[in-house]
């Protein structure tokens, strides 16, 4: 999940030891996936770097630290994918995976996941075509994202409920799906028929209405409880 540190009430979790060499801004680690001006010291919070997005998906990298995700199973070889109810129903998650420790950091540091932002940023898209004063910065070549992209479609809209899905790294697979009336085509993490090790809600909505993922989480918890009897 791409951070947005603009909230006045945002918290500043301690930087992970594994992320001490990563660039920071406003007290937060800048996710590898975040669009930045030259030197990666001035992030465009809420905007995704399209080139890095392709690299993260293609090379199975963590979207926060940029390091390779595992390929096995069990503790030490697991991946967290942040998903919404509509992602589950479609069978694909647009958010690349994270190491569990990076996911825990994101949950605390990202105002969207932490429930401190009622809507998605409305200016992240516009910031793509706002060049800085550095003539050597690549921002002068930035373009607006595809209006059909998930980033453009959710700009300024009410926040979705978000869930943290833990899966074995061996089940982490990038697939392509065709678009439909409600979702654009694109690549993402396969969810269809993927065994979920653990599913937790990380943020709800003001009405706190239950979603299909609440029912999935309850079923998983019940299965675990039954297995211990």
Image (cartoon, rainbow, N blue to C red):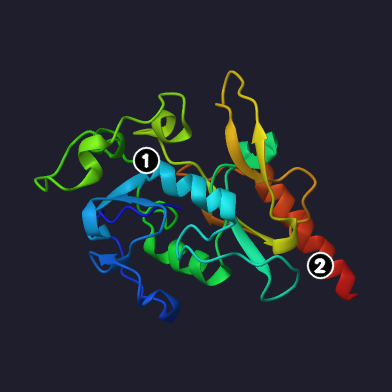
Residue 62 is situated, as x and y percent measured from the top left of the image, at: 52, 61
Secondary structure state at the residue bearing disc 1:
loop
Instruction: Kindly identify the residue that appears in the image at 81 percent across and 67 percent down.
Output: 224
Q: Which residue is mark 2?
A: 224
Q: Residue furthest bottom?
A: 17
Q: Is residue 121 left or right of residue 32?
A: left
Q: How many marks?
A: 2
- Can residue 8 be seen here? no
Extreme-left residue of the structure: 133
- Tell me the residue at 88%/67% (across/down): 226
The residue tagged 1 is 120
Sort mark 1 into few (<14), some (14-19) or many (20+) by Cα contacts within 10 Å. some
**Between 209 and 104, which is closer to the camera in this rendering?**
104
41 versus 34 height, above or below:
below
Disc 2 residue crowd, few under 14, some 14–19, many 20+, Cα 10 Å? few
Q: Is residue 170 above or below residue 91?
A: below
Picture coordinates of residue 116, whole percent (x, y): 35, 54
Q: Quadrant of the C terminus?
A: bottom right
Left or right of 114 on screen, residue 86 = right
Residue 76 seen in the figure: yes
Measured from the top left, where is residue 109 in percent x and y? 38, 64
Contact flag, marks 2 and 1 (Cβ < 8 Å) = no
As drawn, 156 above or below 218: above
Against 178, residue 30 (above or below) is below
Disc 2 versus disc 1: distance between alpha carbons? 35 Å
Question: Which x, y percent locates residue 144?
Answer: 32, 29
Label placed on residue 217: none
Q: Nearer the viewer, mark 2 or mark 1?
A: 1
Q: Secondary structure at mark 2?
A: helix
Residue at image coords 55%, 26%: 184
Q: Earlier in the sequence, mark 2 or mark 1?
A: 1
């Amino acid at each position: 999940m791409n951070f947005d540190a603009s909230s006045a009430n945002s918290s500043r979790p301690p930087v992970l030891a594994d992320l001490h060499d990563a660039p920071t801004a406003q007290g937060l680690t800048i996710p590898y996936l975040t669009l930045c001006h030259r030197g990666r010291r001035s992030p465009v919070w809420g905007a995704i770097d399209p080139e890095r997005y392709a690299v993260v998906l293609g090379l199975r990298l963590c979207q926060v630290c940029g390091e390779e995700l595992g390929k096995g199973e069990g503790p030490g070889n697991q991946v967290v994918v942040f998903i919404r109810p509509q992602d589950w129903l479609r069978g694909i998650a647009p958010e690349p995976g994270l190491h569990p420790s990076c996911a825990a950091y994101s949950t605390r540091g990202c105002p969207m996941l932490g429930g401190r932002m009622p809507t998605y940023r409305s200016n992240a898209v516009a910031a793509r075509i706002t060049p800085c004063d550095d003539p050597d910065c690549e921002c002068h070549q930035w373009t607006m994202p595809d209006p059909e992209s998930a980033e453009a479609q959710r700009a300024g809209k009410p926040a979705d409920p978000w869930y943290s899905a833990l899966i074995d790294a061996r089940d982490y697979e990038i697939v392509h799906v065709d678009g439909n009336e409600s979702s654009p085509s694109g690549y993402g993490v396969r969810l269809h028929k993927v065994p979920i090790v653990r599913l937790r809600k990380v943020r709800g909505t003001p009405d706190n209405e239950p979603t299909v993922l609440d029912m999935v989480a309850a079923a998983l918890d019940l299965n675990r409880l039954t297995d211990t009897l």
